Amino acid sequence: MPTLDIPLFGNIALCLVMVSAAYTLAMALGAGKGRLNLLAAARSGAFATCTFIALAISLLAYAFQSHDFRIIYVARYSDRSMPWYYLFTSLWGGQDGSLLWWLFLLSGYTAACVRWLRGKYVELQPWIIATLMGIMLFFSIVMLFAANPFQTYIATTPPDGEGLNPLLQNYWMVIHPPSLYMGFVGWSVPFAFVIAALVTGRLDEEWIKGARLWAMIAWTFLSVGLLLGCLWSYEELGWGGYWAWDPVENASFMPWLVGTAYLHSAIVQERYGMLKVWNVFLMCFTFFMTIFGTFLTRSGLIASVHSFARSDIGVYFVHFMFLIAFVCIALVAWRFGRLKAKHRIEALLSREFMFLLNNWVLLGMMFFVLVTTTWPLISDWIRGQEVTVGPGFYNEWMVPLGLILLFLMGVGPLVSWRKATGKNLRRAMMMPMALGAVVFVIHLLAGNSMGYPPFRDAYEIYQTATGGILSYFHVVAPITATALSAVVFGTILQEFIRGARVRMRSKKESLLSALYQLISRARRRYGGYIVHLGIVVMYFGFTGAVYDRDAEAALRPGETMQVGNCTDESEVGGACHTFRYDAPVTTNDPNKRAVYGRMTLLDEDGGEIGQVNPAKFIYRTHPDMPTTEVAIRSRADEDLYVILSTVDPQTQRATFRIIVRPFVVWIWIGGLILLLGSLISMWPTARQLALNKRRKRNRGADTGKKKKGPSKAAGVAIALLAWLLSYGNVAEAQNDSTSSLHAGTVVIDDPGERQLFGQLLCQCGSCARLPLDSCSCSWADEARAELRLQMEAGAQPLDLIARFRAQHGAAAISIPSDEGFDRLIWAVPIAVFAVAAFGVVLIGRRWRTASPESVSDGEDGESSADDDDSDDDYDDKLDAELRRLERD
Amino acid sequence: MRGLIRFFDALGSAGLLPFFFAAAATCALFAALFFLWRSLRAAFGAADSFHLPSAEAESRRILEERKTALLSNLADLEFEHAGDKISDEDYEALDKKLRAEAKRVLRLLDDDVKPYRAKAEKRLKNYLSERGAPYREQAEKPLAADPSVEEARPEAAEPDDEASAEADKASDAAEKDAAENVCKECDTVNDADAAFCKKCGTPMSEADNTDDTDEVDSAEEDSP
């Protein structure tokens, strides 16, 4: 049917992208070298490159919509029965297309940034454009030579495509990858700023200010993308969880951690001109981690549930990473002299130092995840032995680090800038600490009776001292998390109350107007606090995972099953829930056949509360890959997560697994609060808006052209996010649209079994990295049965693990042992963490002692002669300036 | 957004989506060629030239940034003191230190504009004497650190002087000019005859610098 030679046009478009990016790079370098007339050429060239990319993506979209199966990518990821929206999402459904999609998003950022830069940052501009073009050039080369989405079949054209993987045929695939990519790609712009600052040597606060909005946009998208990823995992993968420490998840979590550290320490530089080297490093590192994450995901080096197939683009990424690292290190070394801080901190007990501590924990977490994620590679590389690190390992180790971060979040905002006084700090901590203590006591006393016990059963992942210490954390984690969450909540509350009170006193405002004024006048600060609030609410949701309960039953129509706190001796869980299985219902559409297991949720007296419809979808193109669609009923206190494991159309008998997951909904609510907070802190101030308006008026009179100011950029970001969210809300309201990789029947009777199975990996060969507690293949079934028999015979879990390891090798255990070389997996990060802690304190001390008197004292001497007569004048002027600042 | 989805739905069901994307591709191609042409024209011919700011403007920018940071630090300190986060002694010590530093920066900013002020006063004197109006010397006051018009305007002449009307007109014109000679990109106040903004290098529009030279001269009093 297609008559246009789309493959040829597509290849030409990709070539044009490459040529145009190279040309623009040359122009930008020329402009950077002082030939400023080339800057206009570079700016237009950047727009040209972006539109060439738009051309390429439009051609690919056209190929999908017109079923041009000459193109391998189109044939592999679509078929004729797919509706238009999945044909559209197929654009990023596979490796080659998603790289083009990546480039397309980068072109969007680049065009917005170049437009925004008009008339600003003239010195930095050439280098910003050059950096962005360099990145584009790299991606266009990868696409042309290694992952060309327009590649055609050499011989015959298939009559129909293979269809998109059923797992990817849901609306989460419509919104999750674009949002995450927006977060990933977005860091390119602030990275371009830092490279420009390094090259030009303009390393004061200028680049931080320029990059701020872009870093915020990228961070927000990355956060939302991560959360949508959790939501996708929770609703689509059907194994009952939202985060499995999968390498691909980690790949996006690591840049988030570094980016978060950057956003905090950038404030210190903006305010006090300190931490210059550190900020440059953090920004470079964040960008590096986005590329590293892409490399991890794309190269197929590390087995993961949803990584792309192993491919040869890895080597390109390795070269690119070396290039980035080399350029960054060389530039920092060259400019090191200019990166020295002009100012010193006054005291160790100050907000500046708290930010340093926050950076320490965030980077510590990042380093831990980094080492652990790459451990299989490191182990294979150094000693030729494959190992696997499963979620159990991360959960045990990351909980203590996460709690430290939570603690800092509670204390940090209470410490004043420059210098905190012990007495005042103690007074400030009184309320949050009291709140924390009250919650602690309530949880301790009433937790058991409410079904949320304050302590967990001891559980040692190792039989060593380390195992004992970890086990201790494991036991106290629930109550510590709730108490610390209360402390952070108290801190945030107190910050708002105190701020409002100051305004009410000095400006005679009512409480509401004081609060409104407070937030609108210091958006960044209070927006930040709201983000903190979102994080605390999310922590609360994460803590709920401790109290999960599940049940499994095979039912005939009319039979019921119970889940939750249904027996007197059970310790955890909220209410008891009764489900009645009604009947299987089958529906057909051109794309798939769906079998629903209709269930009714009953109340205690047998009255009907509502229906749940978990299902199995059998896609026409993938009949051997039925997907499990879970049904979720969300409430504030718990989610009911219903999985249809098997259904027999003849006998109508069906197996269900129901998981009760307390507080999960708070994770998504926390995400919304986080989004609100970051929008508040991104929103331009009245002053900026007035400035933009004036500019626009000037230009309107001048040329009639419009311009995209920061407010516009923020507006666009907000609109995009709102769109993503509106999608999310639609999806959440709908309960029955999911697919599963892990789905199937996994019967686990008690927590001991769950912990044991969680440490052993399925060895069937096709379910990579799935532990026995969630793998549903027959091999796993048999393995579980055998292990159960051995446990009944009195075997200890640790012996069973050792036996399993001896039988199937070290790679069959999800938690590497705590001996020999394997010990390094935690010892290295912990050692680095400890050394870094020492370093942080040392740096703080040196800063303080190096120049106890601030710079001003020394330099003031020169002009002190005429101080006395004009001092009063200047005092008045300073006051006038301060009043003006307050007015703005 | 729903409307957009419905629009695409309609397109999809009518089988028009391929044409939609084909049209998008065509538009993108033309846009890209247009930008490429503009870029090549800029590289090899008529280009809007960009200029780097002078060293003085650069040092002034750094001072301005420093001033902004110090002012917000002072405001923060005030706020934290009001919120009882910092003790009175520490507050006083830090406040004194920050104020001293802020005053130093303000003074440096003023020193920066001194030569311009002298020049402007001379020109104003010439202008007024040409028109027969006496110029009264002003005791030098520190100029505003911020290049805002109101604070930097010297008074021109006696109100009952016969030339006062003209002088007022002149100062009004000066005010108007100065207000108009704000860079539209970065809002920096530029010399009235500036062809390009001294901060960001954007060309100043024709309208701003083709005024009567005399008036332009008198406007310089406001230009840092």
Image (tube, helix red, strand yellow):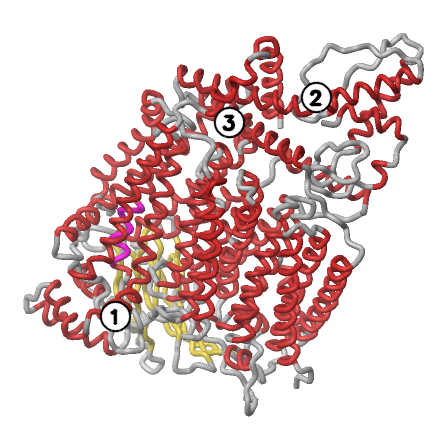
Using the image, name the chain to which the residue with label 3 belongs.
B
Range shown magenta:
A393-402
Q: Which residue is mark 1?
A: A386
Horizontal and vertical percent for residue A764?
26, 78
What residue appears at the point 52 percent right and 51 percent down from the top-left corner?
A191
- In the picture, measured across the screen, residue A256 lies left or right of residue A690, that is left
**Distance between the alpha carbons at the discs numbered 2 and 1:** 73 Å
Using the image, name the chain to which the residue with label 1 belongs.
A
Q: Quadrant of the N terminus of chain A?
A: bottom right
What residue appears at the point 44 percent right and 81 percent down from the top-left corner?
A622
Of badges 2 and 1, the one in the foreground is 2
Using the image, name the chain to which the residue with label 2 belongs.
B
Query: Which secondary structure class fits the magenta region best?
Result: helix
Q: Which residue is mark 3?
A: B73
Q: Amino acid at mark 3?
A: Asn
Reply above or below: B120 against A598: above
Reply above or below: A83 against B117: below
What residue appears at the point 43 percent right and 59 percent down from the top-left corner?
A229
